[in-house]
Structures are given as structure tokens and as C-alpha cells.
Image (cartoon, rainbow, N blue to C red):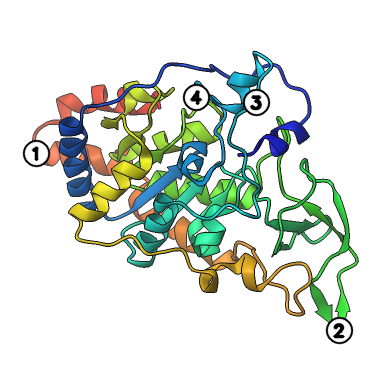
Amino acid sequence: MSCNYAEGLSEYENKGVLGVPEIFDSPEVVDEKCEKLCEMIKNSRHVVVHTGAGISTSAGIPDFRSPKGVWTLEKIGEKPSMNISFDEAVPTKTHLALKFLVDKEMIRYIVSQNIDGLHLKSGVPRKNLAELHGNMFVEQCNICGCQFVRSKATSSVGQKLLGQNCKRIIARGRSCRGKLTDTILDWEANLPENDLEMSDYHSSVADLNICLGSTLQIVPSGNLPLRCKKYGGKVVIINLQPTKQDKKADLIIHTYVDLAIEKIMKKLGLEIPEYSKETDPTKFGGEDNIIPIPWDIEKEDLTEVKELYDIYCKNFQKKKRKLLQKNGKNKNFKEDEDENSSV
């Protein structure tokens, strides 16, 4: 996201492969591939979308590893020309379309590597969103772990104290004695347990994982879309640069994410809604709000996706073996099993 965020992180040498040239499919090819993706979405029972920095560049927030990305330019002593503040940035067409598709239950879950808060601003419910690397508009108690929405982006990164007390009321008006910190991870910090667990389960249950605007270099985030391959699912990537997982993808679209999303929505017969402050939690909540807005993953949401995992993934190989035996194709099973187990 922004240079200010990048500058707040600690020094780190291994920032991945930088500045790889972008690839552009022809308009005809993009249209053909978007048509194919539409059919995949329509025929899927559980679609999960994985988002990276590339979906926020049209909001004025630079990415990291593109030819003009933060880390790429840093290597030659330069900074991106665009660098809007997080407070001023608003959700892009992609963010708004994803929120709409979540509401329509055409997308079941979003796994985000982004810390810019644009999914939150678009109105995506917490039960449908994992934020693996944190959120500039979310603070967390260092004792009870409860999270709350902020009206302004944090001034720090790296899970540092913000100088405020926890807003959770325990009993009889007494609040938790914890202190609030930002939720932004520094290099090699542990990912938030609940977000990662939800992401892992949803990515496995999905029969279609769609990756938007990410080179999928950071792990474990970049490996999550492949979880579904072990259970017969498919992976689609929309990105201008080659990604780490291209060889295992079922479809790759090389174009701007917003352009692809616009085409897909049109082919689905749907309109992308406009951004509205009325559905943006950062505009009616935050640190000064009398009634804090919680941003916690609920236990029942985790229980629900675990149950789906038991239905679709548990004992998948045994079920596949029985099906192949029934159809007289058991001789091919060992080969398929070996291929899946490598994911």
C-alpha cells in the first residue's frame, strides 16, 4: 500500500522477485477468458477470492513488486509518484464488485493480503473476510485480543501500542485492562491465528479460488489458493505479472484487475455499485465512537467452515477411490493421488 506504511517496517533484505515485466493479453483474449471465468463462477458452489496490492493501485495506492512498485523503486533509490493517504483512499471497482458478489453469495470468502482497509470500507462483513497482514483501520487489545474499527488509519505499524485502553466491557461497566495496538504485521511476524485458520479452511473447501492482483510470493498467503487443488478445485489468476503459482493455475488472465472485473460483472448481468459512506464502518465508528464497532471473527463462523471442510474435504481421497472403483477407473487413482499430494 502506501510508501509511509512501507517505511514503517523494519529492514528486510529478501523482498521477493521485483520489477518483472508486465504481460498484456489482447482484448479478444481477455474477453474470451473472462467469459470462461464467468461460467466457472456460475458453476461453482464455493468461490474464494484472494486479493493482493494490485487491486488497490487504481485507488492511488502503489503496489510493491511491479515495475513501478514500492520495493522495485526502493532498490534504485526512488519512490512511487502516487501515494494517496489511507484516510483519503476509497474502494475501487474491484472492491465494490467483490462486496456485491459476497452479498449475492456468489463469493463466499475473501482472503486479503492488503492492509489498506479498502475491503472494510466497501462494507464486506467480517465473517466473509480474512486480513492476513492486518488493517490500518483496525486496532487490537494486547490482552483479550478483541479488535475494533477505527475512523482514521493508525499512525504506526508493527503491532505497536497506540496509547489507548481496550474498549471491551467485561461486566458491570468495567472495561478490559488491556492496551490497544495496531494490527499491521512486520516482516516474519506470525499471521493472526483466526484469520489464517479461516483462510485455510475456506481455501480448501473452495471449488474455485480466484487470485487478484498478487504475484503470490509471500507465504503462507501465496500458497493458500492451491489448497483446493488437493480436493478437485480450480485456481484462476488475474495479474499483469507472472506469479509463483502460474504452472498450477487452470486459467490466467493478464490484464488490469478492474478491467477484468468490469467485464465479468457485465457478463453476469450485474452492475458495480457506487461507494457509499453509509456502508463504510470507518465513517460511522472508530476510536472516538461511544459504541465501538467490533471487528472480531466469531467462533460460530469458524465452526461453520470446519463443518464444510468435513463435508467436502475430509476423507476426500477415500471418496475418490470408491468413485473410481465404481466407475472401473481405479488404475488411474494412484497417479492422480500422487499429483494432488504434491500441492
Quarter the N terminus occupies: top right
Q: CA distance from mark 2 to mark 1?
A: 64 Å
Q: Earlier in the sequence, mark 2 or mark 1?
A: 2
Q: CA distance from mark 3 to mark 4?
A: 13 Å
Q: CA distance from mark 4 to mark 2?
A: 50 Å
Between 300 and 168, the one nearer to me in the picture: 168
- Tell me the mark number nearer the camera, choosing from 1 and 3: 3
- Tell me the mark number nearer the camera, choosing from 4 and 1: 4
Q: Residue furthest bottom?
A: 172
- Mark 3 sits on what residue? 79
At a point 23% along the width and 37% down the height, the residue shown is 321
- Tell me the mark number nearer the camera, choosing from 3 and 4: 3
Side (left or right) of 190 relative to 81: right
- Tell me the mark number nearer the camera, choosing from 2 and 3: 3
Q: CA distance from mark 1 to mark 3?
A: 59 Å
Determine whether the residue tagged by mark 1 lies in a helix, strand or loop: loop
Circles 4, 1 touching at the beta carbon (< 8 Å): no
Q: Name the image quarter holding residue 253.
A: top left
Residue 207 visible in rendering: no
Circles 2, 3 touching at the beta carbon (< 8 Å): no
- Tell me the mark number nearer the camera, choosing from 2 and 1: 2
Q: Amino acid at mark 4?
A: Ser
- Mark 1 sits on what residue? 327
